[in-house]
């Protein structure tokens, strides 16, 4: 594969090669963008099949779960293809910064919760000075209102834990590392944040998602690891679910 640093080949699987963390990503923007758009296409295909097979499921928790799984399969395949030059699974993890420390929740969770509870309201206070005010959480409230107890638990697991891990693996682990290597952090981090927001296909929620993407991206770039970004994503998503569930009639 063109642009792959030779140092990624033939690394001794038993060696303590910390220098692997400092190598450029062994993939280019092309392969990750192809995987990203392929994953979105796969999720749309899965959603279309679901609509045709069981239209009643598309508006509930089941629809979110199934479409998310389609997207995540694409993300996982992209990870496998992009890191195929790595000598070991350990090197694959290091290549995307998939390392977590016990301190990461202490940093990430407060950052994610603060972004949701403070940053997003302030941002939309500004946005609604220029456009008509709307209920930003209406779509999420509508979804949760149609779920029962088990459905809410499943949705919480998918949104609160599954999505943060898989999305950070793709966006900050693969895409941002390639973008920063090619464009530098001033362009690479915002670019991935925009793509992260657009992937959710929600125009009204886009400013908040862009803000969250910038926070996650900064944490990943500043630490060189996905741990803080994953936990920030968990805090951001779970605080959303908690607010909606606690205020539901």
Image (cartoon, helix red, strand yellow):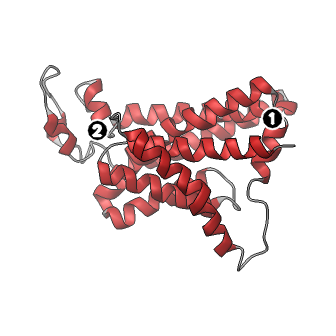
Which residue carries the number 2 mark?
95
Residue 56 located left or right of residue 113: right
Direction from residue 182 to residue 194 in the image, left or right? right
Q: Residue furthest bottom?
A: 130
> Is residue 133 at least partly visible in the picture?
yes
For residue 34, which numbered disc appears in the image?
Answer: none
Question: Quick one: label 1, few (<14), some, or many (20+) residues within 10 Å?
Answer: some
Kindly check if marks 1 and 2 are in contact, taking CB atoms under 8 A apart as contact.
no
| Earlier-in-chain disc, 1 versus 2 | 1
Q: Nearer the viewer, residue 5 or 67?
A: 67
Which residue is under mark 1? 60
**Residue depicted at 86% across the width and 33% down the height:** 55
| Residue 19 placement, left or right of 221 | left
Q: Quadrant of the N terminus?
A: top left
Residue at x 68% of width, y 42% of height:
241
Q: Quadrant of the C terminus?
A: top right
């Amino acid at each position: 594969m063109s642009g792959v640093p030779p140092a990624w080949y033939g690394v001794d699987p038993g060696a303590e090669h910390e220098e692997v963390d400092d190598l450029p990503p062994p993939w280019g923007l092309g392969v990750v963008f192809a995987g990203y758009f392929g994953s979105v296409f796969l999720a749309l295909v899965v959603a279309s099949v679901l609509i045709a097979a069981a239209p009643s499921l598309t508006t509930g928790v089941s629809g979110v779960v199934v479409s998310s799984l389609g997207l995540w399969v694409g993300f996982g395949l992209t990870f496998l293809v992009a890191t195929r030059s790595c000598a070991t699974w350990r090197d694959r993890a290091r290549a995307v910064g998939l390392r977590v420390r016990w301190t990461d929740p202490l940093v990430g969770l407060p950052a994610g919760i603060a972004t949701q509870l403070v940053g997003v309201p302030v941002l939309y206070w500004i946005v609604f000075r220029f456009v008509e005010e709307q209920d930003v959480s209406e779509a999420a409230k509508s979804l949760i209102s149609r779920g029962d107890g088990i459905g809410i638990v499943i949705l919480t697991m998918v949104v609160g834990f599954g999505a943060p891990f898989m999305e950070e693996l793709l966006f900050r682990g693969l895409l941002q590392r390639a973008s920063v290597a090619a464009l530098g952090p001033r362009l690479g981090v915002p670019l991935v944040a925009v793509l992260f927001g657009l992937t959710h296909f929600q125009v009204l929620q886009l400013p908040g998602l862009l803000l969250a993407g910038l926070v996650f991206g900064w944490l990943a770039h500043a630490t060189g690891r996905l741990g803080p970004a994953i936990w920030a994503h968990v805090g951001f998503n779970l605080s959303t679910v908690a607010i909606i569930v606690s205020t539901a009639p």
